[in-house]
Image (spheres, rainbow, N blue to C red):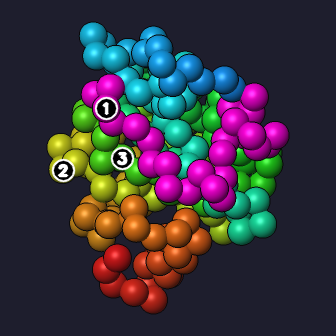
């Protein structure tokens, strides 16, 4: 797992630790020392800890004029034991909402497992963004992760599923990905 690093092709456009509106503003990284772990596995030092012992993230891009953020995740999402969504909502999303972000693209191809509890924080997140025509989309979740999210009834507050499951997002610019997802949500395109 230590070789999986956050997507870095957009660093010329955005760096979360240089963004004074980001919850990770001013964070320093040691590229030569691996200290963060998911269970017994070290992860790349560029991933950001936000309070969960098993789930890490990287804000890959934030556009305050267009009100969207793209966030990549890695690890095990565990709401049942660690209440990961609470940490995500309180320590990351609430900060971004205050800065004007209402549309969220969460890339979950490195989320290995999901253990749901209830959907109260997802509902709160949805309530916080819907008045600004906001939305939440999960891209490239594994099938078993989507099934567990459906059992927890997260689909009432976030978009995921077949349409957002096999999206080749890496070669594109963030604005293109945002436009394509927004078009899909508005029914202007069928598949990404």
- Image-based side of 40 in relation to 87, left or right: left
CA distance separating discs 1 and 2: 23 Å
Q: Earlier in the sequence, mark 1 or mark 2?
A: 1
Residue occupying the point 36% across, 46% down: 108
Q: Observer-nearest residue: 57 or 118?
A: 57
Q: Earlier in the sequence, mark 2 or mark 3?
A: 3
Marks 2/3: CA distance? 11 Å
**Residue visible at 73% across and 47% down in the picture:** 97
Residue 129 in view? no
Q: What secondary structure is the stretch in magenta mostly built from? A: loop
Q: Is residue 152 above or below residue 60?
A: above
Q: Position of residue 182 (x, y in %)?
A: 52, 75
CB under 8 Å between callouts 2 and 3?
Answer: no
Q: Quick check: 106 left or right of 133? A: left
**Residue span colored magenta:** 1-26
Q: Which residue is mark 3?
A: 108
Viewer can see residue 10? yes
User: Could you tell me residue 105's position as x and y percent?
Assistant: 50, 57
Q: In the displayed structure, does residue 104 sit left or right of residue 188?
A: right
Q: Nearer the viewer, residue 17 or 77?
A: 17
Q: Dot 1: few (<14), some (14–19), or many (≥20) neighbours within 10 Å?
A: few
Q: Hey, which residue is sitting farthest bottom in the picture?
A: 188
Residue 4, how many percent across, how many down? 33, 36
To which residue does mark 1 refer?
3
Element under label 2? helix
In the picture of the structure, the residue carrying the numbered disc 2 is 143
Per the image, label 3 sits on a secondary structure element best described as strand
The crowding category of the residue bearing disc 3, from other C-alpha atoms within 10 Å (few below 14, some 14 to 19, many at least 20), is many
Tell me which numbered mark, 1 or 3, is placed earlier along the sequence. Answer: 1
Decide: is 79 above or below 15: above
**Residue 11 among magenta residues:** yes
């Amino acid at each position: 797992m230590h070789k999986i690093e956050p997507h870095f092709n957009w660093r010329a456009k955005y760096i979360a630790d240089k963004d004074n509106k980001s919850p990770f503003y001013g964070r320093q990284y040691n590229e030569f020392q691996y200290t963060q772990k998911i269970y017994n596995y070290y992860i790349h030092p560029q991933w950001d800890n936000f309070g969960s012992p098993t789930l890490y993230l990287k804000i890959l891009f934030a556009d305050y004029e267009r009100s969207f953020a793209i966030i990549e995740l890695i690890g095990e999402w565990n709401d049942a034991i660690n209440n990961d969504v609470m940490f995500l909502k309180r320590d990351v999303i609430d900060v971004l909402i205050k800065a004007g972000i209402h549309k969220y693209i969460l890339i979950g191809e490195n989320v290995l497992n999901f253990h749901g509890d209830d959907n109260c924080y997802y509902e709160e997140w949805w309530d916080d963004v819907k008045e600004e025509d906001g939305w939440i989309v999960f891209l490239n979740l594994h099938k078993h992760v989507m099934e567990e999210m459906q059992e927890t009834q997260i689909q009432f507050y976030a978009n995921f599923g077949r349409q957002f499951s096999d999206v080749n997002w890496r070669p594109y610019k963030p604005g293109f990905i945002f436009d394509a997802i927004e078009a899909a949500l508005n029914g202007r395109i069928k598949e990404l």
